[in-house]
Image (tube, rainbow, N blue to C red):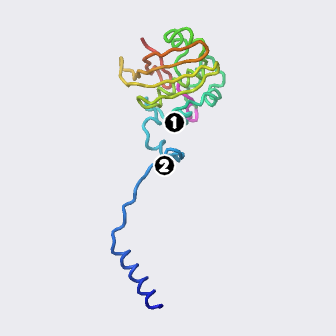
Amino acid sequence: MTIIRTKHALLTIIVALLLPAAPAVDADPPPWAPAHGWRKKHDPYYQGYSGTHWDRDYGIIAGKCNREAIGTVLGGAIGGAIGSSVGKDGNRGVAIILGAVLGAVIGNKIGKAMDDADRACIGHALELAADRRTVGWTGAEGINYQVTPIASFQRDGMKCREYRLRANGLNVDEDRREQACLVEEGRWEVVE
């Protein structure tokens, strides 16, 4: 009985040594699991459309802007001016779309309902979201926003993106196509 087991074990070892090893597969994590840093190293949009590396994506890549976290970064700055600033230690805050211009272009109802965190969600979506990838959130006024970058292009030497902005709730129901250009690091301006 021991001789048969020994022969069987020896045969198993010989077969294992003679068979070619299966190639290793470099697989991405499943969609429900965290990326464990894979995106930071491999996803060009995590680095940012403008080439700027952002320390956080605030949920943009997953399709849901975390406006509360963005609001904390903005810290109540008027117009979100410091939100896009580059820290002295190299940490970057959040990209933002310029508020005064945005209100004038996209319409009175949406412009009045938006706060700095909503503008930052739009700006950061323009910075990090891939074309045709929708990013959504609910604003402080209870309005649901969705931004979908459609196409990237150059205008007068500036990097620009065309996007779709949808807003609905509290007597607001807008669906618009806009264009915005990067005027400086982290600051997007709506253009006509």
Residue situated in front as seen by the camera: 50 or 117: 117
Where residue 78 sits in the image (x, y, percent)? 63, 17
To which residue does mark 2 refer?
A: 29
- Quarter occupied by residue 141: top right
- Quarter occupied by residue 82: top right
Main SS of the magenta segment? Answer: loop
Q: Secondary structure at mark 2?
A: loop
Q: Is residue 18 left or right of residue 45?
A: left
Magenta stretch, residue numbers: 88-95
Distance between mark 2 and mark 1 Cα atoms: 14 Å
Whether residues under marks 2 and 1 lie with C-beta atoms below 8 angstroms apart, the answer is: no
Q: Residue furthest front?
A: 1
At x 51%, y 32%, the residue is 63
Q: Secondary structure at mark 1?
A: loop
Where residue 60 sits in the image (x, y, percent)? 52, 32
Q: Amino acid at mark 1?
A: Ala
Where residue 37 sits in the image (x, y, percent)? 51, 46
Where residue 173 sits in the image (x, y, percent)? 53, 14
To which residue does mark 1 refer?
A: 62
Q: Is residue 73 left or right of residue 32?
A: right
Q: Amino acid at mark 2?
A: Pro
